[in-house]
Amino acid sequence: MSWEPFGARLRRAMDERGPLCVGIDPHAALLADWGLGDDVAGLERFSRTVVEATADRVAVLKPQSAFFERFGSRGVAVLEKSVEEARAAGALVVMDAKRGDIGSTMAAYAESFLHRDAPLFSDALTVSPYLGYGSLKPAVELARENGAGLFVLALTSNPEGAEVQRAVRGDGRTVGATMLAHLAAENAGQEPMGSFGAVVGATLGDLSSFDLAVNGPLLAPGIGAQGATAADLPAVFGAAVRNVVPNVSRGVLRHGPDVASLRAAAERFAEEIRAAVAPA
Ligand SMILES: O=C(O)c1cc(=O)[nH]c(=O)n1[C@@H]1O[C@H](COP(=O)(O)O)[C@@H](O)[C@H]1O
């Protein structure tokens, strides 16, 4: 069976729906704000409401696995259901589980999220390359076979990331730039773009010293609660802004539990992003 690659599916979704990615991050504080219990029933209601409000209109939904794992197997069952419902409503799902391990174990993580028969199959998975980019090879291969993708943590939105990602190697390149170069090689020649994206925070200011032209998507968290705005995107990403998938989690979620208010918040962000990245 040959599946349409994630990069092609994502480009189409971005063209049709705009590039916004809404995060499903059921923080305990948000459950309380929504009047829900910090329990599996609250989790289920929260996740279902976000899917109902947004999955038929945004390109990407990104559930944060930790908030589901917190509730054990019943939380993971809610996650499975959310992924299924989001995909059924037409959204692509990026599973934010930030996996990374030695290659032989990485293969098992890949089987868990990137194999079409896996209960948690997702269109793409966030992965950490800090056991060495090569350790991700089994995930790259399985993603390719299943028409899925990866988002590799390259330049993360948090200030602590710099001590690793901006460290300069023996060859004069930073670690983050090296990850971007690996992705560019992975995506070479793919049309309309490759399936192997980078995570690059929208909070990072001028990134002109990095070559962001990886011919793949750039997942850009940090808008809203972490202080970046849609208007920052062109200055941060330059010409690569066309490939940016901006993520907003709490900035949208704080408008729940009312479905119409959540929807309106997502639409406001989508509109600000459209205005900011529109070709001049
Ligand atoms: O991979 C990610 O999604 C991610 C990478 C990164 O560098 N920074 C970052 O904030 N994230 C995730 O993006 C989401 C940001 O959430 P808000 O700050 O609430 O919009 C959280 O789920 C984070 O785990």
Image: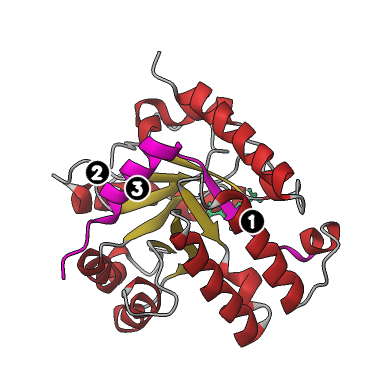
Does the segment drawn in magenta span residue 11? yes
Relative to 87, is 276 above or below?
Answer: above
Magenta segment, which residues?
1-28
Label 2 beta carbon less than 8 Å to ligand 1: no
Residue visible at 20% across and 68% down?
A: 145
Amino acid at pointer 2: Met
Q: Is residue 204 left or right of residue 189?
A: right
Can I make out residue 169 in this image? no
Does the segment drawn in magenta span residue 86? no
Per the rendering, the mark at residue 10 is: 3
Pick the residue in front: 34 or 168: 34
- Residue 25 position within the rendered picture, expressed as x and y whole percent measured from the top left: 65, 60
- Residue 116 position within the rendered picture, expressed as x and y whole percent measured from the top left: 31, 74
Amino acid at pointer 1: Val
- Residue 176 position within the rendered picture, expressed as x and y whole percent measured from the top left: 39, 49
Q: Is residue 145 left or right of residue 243?
A: left
Residue visible at 37% across and 80% down?
A: 118
Residue tagged 1: 50
Relative to 93, is 253 above or below?
Answer: above
Which quadrant holds the N terminus? bottom left
